[in-house]
Amino acid sequence: MTGYAQHDVPRRKLIEVSIPLQKINQESAREKSIRHGHPSTLHLWWARRPLAAARAVLFSQLVDDPASRPDLYPTEDEQNAERKRLFDLIERLVVWENSNDENLLAEAHRKILESTDGNPPPILDPFAGGGTIPLEAQRLGLEAHASDLNPVAVLINKALIEIPPKFAGQAPVFPGAAAETIQDWPRATGLAEDVRRYGQWMRDEAEQRIGHLYPKAVLPDGSEATVIAWIWARTVTCPNPECRIAMPLVRSWWLGKKKGKEAYVVPVVDGKTVRYEIGHDLAHAPTKDNDGTVGRTGATCIRCAAAVELKYIRAEGQAGRMGAQLMATVAEGNRRRIYLAPTDTDEAAADVPHPQSSPAGTLFDWPGRINVVRYGLTEFADLFTPRQLTALTTFSDLVDEARDLIQRDALAAGMPLGDRLADGGTGAAAYADAASTYLGVVVSRTADRSSSIASWDSSASKIRNTFSRQALPMNWDFAETNVFSSSTGSFASQLGWPIETLESATARTYASVAQASATSSVKQPALLSTDPPYYDNIGYSDLSDFFYVWLRRSLGDVHPSILSTMLVPKAEELVANPYRHGGKDGAHQFFEDGFREVFATARKHAYPEFPITVYYAFKQQDASKDGQASTGWETLLEGMIRSGWQITATWPMRSELSNRMLSQGTNALASSIVLALRPRPDGAPRTDRRGFLAALRAELPDKLRELQQGAIAPVDLPQAAIGPGMAVFSRYSGVLEDDGSKMTVRTALQRINAILDEVLGELENDFDAPTRFALTWFRQYGFTSGTFGEAENIANARGISLDALERAGILTKGGGKVGLIAPDDMPADYDPSADDQISEWEVVMHLTRVLAAEGVPAASVLLGQVPSTVDGELCRELASLLFTIAEGRKSTALANHFNNLGAAWSEIARGARTAAQQGTLL
C-alpha cells in the first residue's frame, strides 16, 4: 500500500477503543420511522443496515483514538477531553436531520484527514447490497467503491452513489422546468425534477393507452369515484362431488378495521355460485372462529363445509385449475375508503388477454421461501394478473420512449450528445440514461405492489406490498391496485419515493459501482467496511429475480452489461442454499469456504494502518440460552481468525427501541454486531492457556473502563467486552490447551465471559460500605423484605450498622424485617447537597426514579447537586451492575430502568455539569 506514512505501531482507531454506542443505537432505531427521502425508499432491498450506524462506524474506523496521539494529546486528561469532543461530533453526525449538513460533514472530514495524514483510503464494500455503507462513505467525503454480484443491488448502488455526482448542479432539461423555479439546482435536484416531469408524462401517456382497463366505481348515489383496488379471492373446485362450486380461498373477510369505518366481505351462496356483499354491522362481523376459509392446514368449502387439504389445492393449482373471483372494490371517498360489492363491469374490465411480451423466467422452488411454485405459479408472469401484466409492460415500454424524449430535450438545452452512461459519458445520451434509470426503478417499485402476491391491509386500509416479508408466499386473497389512482401502490405514489431520495442524495464525491464477486473485488487497494450475507438468512438472488425481470425489460439497453443474463446470476452467490448445494451440510460448507476465501484474500491486500469493519447479523433463534453466543457467531469468529485476522472490537448494534431490549428474553443478542479487525502479523506467537488467561486479567479492566467512556448501555456491555477479549485471543497464532490442542473460539468466549464477571466483581470493592451492603442484600432479596438478623450480619461484616443505613435512607426496618427502599419509594424532595451520609447507592436509586418519571433534564439537575465527594464513574458502574443483577433475578422492569440509566449516563453527566455551573436548583 502506498501514500501513507508508516508507523512502527499502528495507531489505534476510535472504533477499537470506545464509541458513543447508545446514541448510535438510539438514532439507528429512530431511523426506522423516517421514510421520505431515506435512501432505503429508492428501491426495496433486504436487511439494510441503518445509515446512522454505518456513518459512525466509518468515521470511527478512520479517526485515531486520542490515546494513540501523545504528540497531540500528551496527558490522559487531554486525551479524555478530545475523546469526548469526538463523541460529541459522532452524536451530532448520526442524527438523520444532519445527514446533509455540509458544515458538520466538513468538520468530520477534517478529523478524518488529521488521522490519515491528509490522504484517507478509498472505502470498499464488496457485498454492497442496498448501498448503505458506500453511501455513507461518500457522505463523509471519502472515495467510495461498491461491488455486488447481484445486478439489482448494482443498479441500486449506481442510482444512490454513482449517478448523482455525475449530474450535480445540472438544471432540468424538461421544457420550461428550469424557468419555473429560480434556484441553482444543488446536488442532483435538477435530475430529480426531470424524473418527476418525465415520470408524470409516462403516467399520463399510459393512461391514454390503457386507462379504459381501470374504470371508475359507481357509488350508491350514482356518482363516480376512483378505484383504489380490487380485492380478489383465488378459487378451486370443491372436491365434494355433490358440491363442486368454485370455492373461494380467503385468508380474512375483513376489509377495514379502523374504528368507525369497519367493513367486511359477506359471502352469499346462491345455488352453486358465490356472490359477495359488503357488511358494516359489527354484531355480524367475522370472528376469530369464522374469519376466512383457508389456513395453514387446509380450507373449508363455504357451501358444503367440506374440509379440503392443501394437497388437493396444490394439485389443482399445478394442473392449471386455480381461478380467481372478485370479492370487493375499494374506492376513494372523502377522507375514507368506500367498499363496494363487485359488479359485472369490474369483472369485465379485468378480463384482458396476456400481453405478448411478458417477462420470461422460471421461479425457483424453495420451500419456505418461494411457496407459490407448489401451487402452480411457476413462471414470473404467473405472479401477475393479465391486467397487471398489461400495465407493467406498458410502463416498461414507456421508459424507453421517455429516454428518447429526455435525450432530445437535453440536446435542445445545449448539452452535447456524448457517450452513453455505461461508457462513462456525461452528455445528453448519458443524462437520458441516468434519468431513465430512475424511471425503470419506479416501474420495478410499482411491480412490488402490482402482483397477485400483494394483499389488502385491513388495519391500515391500503395495499400491502409483495415483499411484506423476505419470501414469495402464497396469498389466497389478493389486492389489485389501480395504477392510475393517487393511493398507495399507484404509479404516481411509487414515483415520489425515488425522487425524494434523489433530491437528498449527497453527490459529494466520486463513487464507482461494479458487478463482481467479492473475492475479485477485495483484491483492489481499498479499506473494507462491509455487511456480508450470512448463511441462508436471505435468498437474495432468487427473491430479487422478481425485480430483475422488470428492470431488464425497462433498462436492458441502458445498462446492457449489468442486465445481460435472463435471471440474476446464482452459481457464485455466497448464500447457503440447501436446494443448490446438496442439502444443509453442503450449503454450509459452500458458504464457509467462500466466506473464508473472501477474507483470506482481503487479508493479503489489507492496509496495516487501519482496521476493517464487518457487520454480522444475528439470527435470534440461533442464540444460546445465556444470550451470548450462537453457532453462526462462533463460526464467523473462527473463520476470521483462521483467515489471518485479529479481532480488535465487537460493537452490538441495535435498531430496536430501548424499551424492547428485554422483550424477547434476558440479554437478547443485538440485531447485529460490528467487528473491527486488523491483519494479524505473519509469525504471530503462540501461547498457552495460562498465558492467555493472564493477559485477559491484566488487560480487560482497563479496556472496560475505555468502553464505558462511550455511553454503552449495560445490556450491551457483555457483547462489547468480547472485542477486547477476542483481541487478546486472536493476536496469537494459537492458544494451546494443556493437551496441546488449539483452544476453540467457544472456549475462549467462555473464558472471556468468566473473567469479565471476575473483573466486574472486583469493582465492587471500590464502592462505599452502604452500597456494598445494599448490593449484597439486593442480590438475595431485591426490594422485598428479609430477616433482621441476616441483615445485621451482612452490615456488621461491612463495618456499618442498620441504624446508620436507615438514617441514610437506604432501607426500612421493623417487626424483625428489613427491606431496601425501591427507587419509586424514594422521597421526591430529596436534596443530595444536604445529605451528609450520601452513598453511591442513594444517588443511583434517586437518579433511577427521576429519569423514569421526568427524563434526562431532571436527572441532570439532580446529579448536578451531588457533592464532588461522590465518584460519578462508580455510580455509572453501579447502574450497570444493578442491571445485571436485576436481569438475573428476572426483574425485567427494574433491569430496564437500570439499563436506561446506564445508557443515558453520559448525557445526564453533561447536563449535570451545565446545571452545576449555572447553580441550578431543583
Image (tube, grey):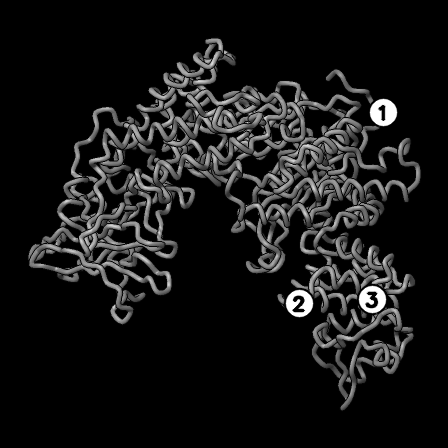
| Residue 395 rendering spot, x and y as whole percentages | 31, 28
Residue found at x 36% / y 33%: 546
- The amino acid sitting under disc 1 is Asp
The disc, 1 or 3, on the residue closer to the chain's N-terminal end is: 1
The disc, 2 or 1, on the residue closer to the chain's N-terminal end is: 1
Say whether residue 869 is left or right of residue 274. right
| CB under 8 Å between discs 1 and 3 | no
Frontmost of labels 1 and 3 is: 3
| Residue designated by label 2 | 894
Residue 881, by quadrant, is bottom right
| Residue 444 rendering spot, x and y as whole percentages | 38, 32
- The amino acid sitting under disc 3 is Leu
Residue 118, by quadrant, is top right
Question: How far separated are the C-alphas under marks 3 and 2?
Answer: 28 Å
| Residue designated by label 1 | 8
| Residue 332 appears in the picture as rendered | yes
| Residue designated by label 3 | 921
Residue found at x 55% / y 58%: 664
